[in-house]
Image: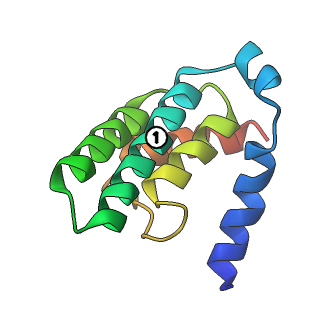
Amino acid sequence: MKRPEILTVALVAPALAVPAVAVAATETPVMALFREWTAAKVTEESAYNVCCEDDEAWQARFAVEKRLILAPCQTSHDWLLKITARSNYGDGSGPDSMESPQLWAEARALVRGA
């Protein structure tokens, strides 16, 4: 496992280990969209496993991803979910500040509160 993969797993694993009951009580719009993105990703991967690239499945996942990125963060956990989706769990490159200025503005705001 490469260092970026280890970091991704280290960051995402605790977030995913939260019991569903605890998440349901404090769910944010970003959390709901992340679950929707995850379901769309499973559908897209299933299409790839059956035969070939499925542009409709990719478009559906990407549409959810765009909504997820634009949803305002309420917590630092929300930001983690956004960057996890946007980088496809670290398989792709993350967006820079030119591509996603809102995402990085949220990061700066969250870090200033640390």
Q: Residue at x 30, y 57 (%)?
A: 47
Q: Amino acid at mark 1?
A: Ala
**Residue at the far bottom in the pictured view:** 2
* Whether residue 44 is situated above or below residue 21 in the rendered picture: below
Locate residue 89: give its quadrant: bottom right
Task: List x then y, in percent, for residue 49.
Answer: 36, 66
Q: Is residue 81 left or right of residue 43?
A: right
**Residue at the far front in the pictured view:** 50
**Residue at the far left in the pictured view:** 55
Task: List x then y, in percent, for residue 37.
Answer: 44, 40
In the depicted view, which residue is nearer to us: 79 or 39? 39
* Whether residue 57 is situated above or below residue 92 in the rendered picture: above
Q: Residue at x 58, y 44 (%)?
A: 81
Q: Is residue 46 left or right of residue 17?
A: left
Q: Residue at x 32, y 45 (%)?
A: 61
Residue tagged 1: 39
Label 1 packing within 10 angstroms: few (<14), some (14-19), many (20+): some
Task: List x then y, in percent, for residue 66.
Answer: 32, 40
In the depicted view, which residue is nearer to us: 32 or 70? 32
Locate residue 93: give its quadrant: bottom left
Q: Circle 1 — which element?
A: helix
Position of the N terminus, as image quadrant, is bottom right
Q: How many marks?
A: 1
Position of the C terminus, as image quadrant, is top right
Q: Is residue 27 left or right of residue 63?
A: right
Q: Does the rendering let one see residue 98?
A: no
In the depicted view, which residue is nearer to us: 24 or 111? 24
Q: Does the rendering let one see residue 27?
A: yes
